[in-house]
């Protein structure tokens, strides 16, 4: 038996087989859980997501298009989910966006208003928006999880506006946890170490960040997707029944170091 046996939930954010969402889904499925998925609108995006999900051994995965930047698309996606299942036991929010032209050293101060607000919208507000729409299907309680990074707490060169958005995401987690706890819904965030994904490669100087972490982290290595996937399963399952409102660092100990 697995710790996710009998649980059904939504995983948002699989773009390919290198994304954190993919590794989280892999761990959920290994532990007996059932995942529903969304993809960015468009045939190309659906094909890419479907290929990645099928590589997990999921035949004919349930997929719905969702553009998290519009209320209409969010409503349509969650309406489709409600037709598929009466109950959601978990929600995984693993999406973020900021214009890569502004994720470079020396570019933060001049960040345009529209770039700032878009990063906040997609990276932080959508966690609250999805939680609100998932809530009616979590009448028996559940667990929600989002993905953050150390740049939310400390200034990381090149992370810029995304760091501000991730700080807002972590604050959103705490307020959601406060409000949803009385409904037996737990809300947490994993602050994962740097991983080579499509999103992370947009950050200027990312390779040097990987090198630095490997030198300075107590475990003397960078985090793997499986490290994060297994920690996510712990947070989504009943094994973490007393944990909510937390940002859990899964970064080989790097965040514990002063220098």
Image (tube, rainbow, N blue to C red):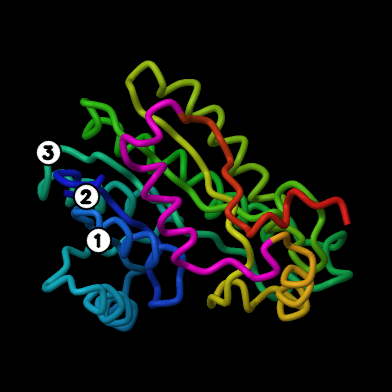
- Mark 3 or mark 2: whose residue is earlier in sequence: 2
Tag nearer the camera, 3 or 1: 1
- Mark 2 or mark 1: whose residue is earlier in sequence: 2
Is 229 within the magenta? yes
Q: Is residue 21 left or right of residue 48?
A: right
Q: Is residue 254 left or right of residue 118?
A: right
Is 180 within the magenta? no
Where 133 sits versus 191, above or below? above
Where 200 sits versus 242, above or below? below
Closer to us: 235 or 19: 235
Q: Is residue 73 left or right of residue 81?
A: right
Q: Mostly what secondary structure, the magenta segment?
A: helix
Q: Residue at x 29, y 62 (%)?
A: 38
As drawn, the residue found furthest toward the front would be: 219
Q: Residues at badges 3 and 1 in contact (C-beta under 8 Å)?
A: no
Q: Which residue is drawn at 46% across and 44% down?
A: 127
SS for dot 3: loop
Q: For the C terminus, which image quadrant?
A: bottom right
Report which residue position mark 1 lands on: 30
- Residue 131, by quadrant, is top left
Looking at the rendering, the stretch of residues picked out in magenta corresponds to 219-242
Report which residue position mark 2 lands on: 2
């Amino acid at each position: 038996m697995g710790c996710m046996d009998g649980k059904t939930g939504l995983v948002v954010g699989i773009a390919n087989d290198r994304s954190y969402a993919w590794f989280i889904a892999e761990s959920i499925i290994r532990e007996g859980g059932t995942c529903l998925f969304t993809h960015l609108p468009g045939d190309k995006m659906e094909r890419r997501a479907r290929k990645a999900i099928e590589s997990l051994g999921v035949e004919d995965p349930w997929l719905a298009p969702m553009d998290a930047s519009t209320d209409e698309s969010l409503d349509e996606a969650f309406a489709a989910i409600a037709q598929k299942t009466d109950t959601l036991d978990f929600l995984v929010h693993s999406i973020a966006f900021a214009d890569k032209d502004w994720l470079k050293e020396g570019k933060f101060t001049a960040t345009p208003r529209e770039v700032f607000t878009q990063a906040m919208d997609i990276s932080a507000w959508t966690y609250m928006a999805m939680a609100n729409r998932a809530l009616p299907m979590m009448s028996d309680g559940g667990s929600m999880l989002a993905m953050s990074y150390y740049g939310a707490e400390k200034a990381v060169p090149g992370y810029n506006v995304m760091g501000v958005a991730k700080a807002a995401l972590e604050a959103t987690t705490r307020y959601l946890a406060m409000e949803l706890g009385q409904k037996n819904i737990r809300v947490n965030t994993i602050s994962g170490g740097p991983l080579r994904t499509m999103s992370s490669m947009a950050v200027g100087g990312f390779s040097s960040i990987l090198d630095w972490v490997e030198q300075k982290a107590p475990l003397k290595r960078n985090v793997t997707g499986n490290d994060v996937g297994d920690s996510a399963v712990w947070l989504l399952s009943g094994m973490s029944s007393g944990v909510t409102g937390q940002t859990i660092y899964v970064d080989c100990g790097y965040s514990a170091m002063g220098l």
